[in-house]
Amino acid sequence: MNILLVFAFLFFVGSVFGWVLELFFRRFFSKNNPERKWINPGFCVGPYLPLYGSGLCVLYLIAGIRPYINLGNPISDTVALLLAMALAMTIIEYIAGVISYKGFRVRLWDYSNEWGNIQGIICPKFSLFWGMLGVAYYYLVHPNILDALDWLSHNLAMSFFIGVFYGVFVIDLVYSTHLLNTLKKLSEENKIVVHVEELKARIRKSHDERWIKYNFFLPFRSDTSLAQHIKAMKAAQKEQRANKKATKTM
């Protein structure tokens, strides 16, 4: 089977699955969503997260080297493989976080309050999460991945849908990059770093308070300009810092 089609399929599956996983995580577990609302977890419009798509491709490659790992003990070999998966996913997360933070002054996620974090982008807690995801992939997904790819090769209609996915994805990526540049400009004007989860929650709350319909797949669309929302975010962050400072001096 064409290797490009294999990775196209894996990226598609990983991106969609990751979006669903993050959707439920942010709905029921995220500290940035205390009201437990359904919030689109992605920065793109569509239901996919490229970080997970890239991650699944990397996990597939790492799992493929299992026969070449020989530490003298099958258990040690498997542990080394799973640690490599966790490390690889953490590196992917770090690269994505650095690009958004350094390149666009935007935080797609923030681990600043987590123990052992590095620049608020990665931390041991979520590296453990990536490790658990690697275990799930290796034992539950990878043994069946060849069957899935064989099925794909005999169902060309699925290849058509994957092609449609990438057509939509490219258009979405252009739109999202434009939005990132807009947020970068606003963040520079206001001299703050835009926290995406906080901004989404702020826009949704503003809509709910005024009984205005909230667009789940276009979470940054609002009758109030993004500039006003970011100014309000800046004021709220300033107030939080002042309260923390006052608490420390008491």
Image (tube, rainbow, N blue to C red):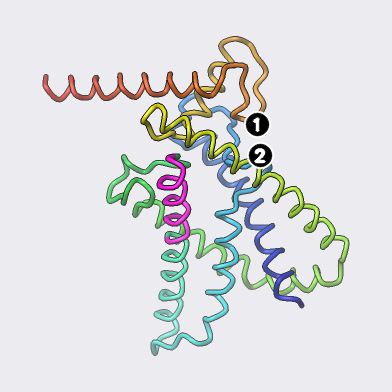
Tag 1–tag 2 contact (CB < 8 Å): yes
Q: Please, what is the three-letter code of the amino acid marked with disc 2?
A: Val
Which callout, 1 or 2, points at the residue further toward the start of the chain? Answer: 2
Instruction: Examine the rendered structure and indicate whether residue 191 appears above or below residue 239.
Output: below
Instruction: Examine the rendered structure and indicate whether residue 35 appears above or below residue 194.
Output: above
Crowd band around label 2 with a 10 angstrom C-alpha radius: few (<14), some (14–19), many (20+): many
Q: Residue 189: x, y in percent?
A: 41, 28
* Residue that appears at 67% across and 64% down: 10
Determine the secondary structure under disc 1: loop
The residue that mark 2 highlights is 45
Q: Nearer the viewer, residue 132 or 220?
A: 220
Which label belongs to residue 115?
Answer: none
Residues shaded magenta: 91-105
Residue 99 drawn in magenta = yes
Residue positioned most to the top: 210
Q: Residue 186: x, y in percent?
A: 47, 30
Q: Nearer the viewer, residue 230 or 123?
A: 230
Quadrant for residue 47, please give it: top right
Quadrant for residue 176, please give it: top right
Q: Nearer the viewer, residue 69 or 105?
A: 105
The majority secondary structure of the magenta stretch comes to: helix
Quadrant containing the N terminus is bottom right
Instruction: Examine the rendered structure and indicate whether residue 117 appears above or below residue 210.
Output: below
Quadrant containing the C terminus is top left
The residue that mark 1 highlights is 218
Q: Please, what is the three-letter code of the amino acid marked with disc 1?
A: Leu
Marks 1 and 2, Cα distance to the nearest angstrom?
Answer: 6 Å
* Residue that appears at 53% across and 24% down: 226
Q: Residue 238: x, y in percent?
A: 31, 22
Q: Residue 97: x, y in percent?
A: 44, 50
* Residue that appears at 75% across and 48% down: 168
Residue 61 placement, left or right of 168: left
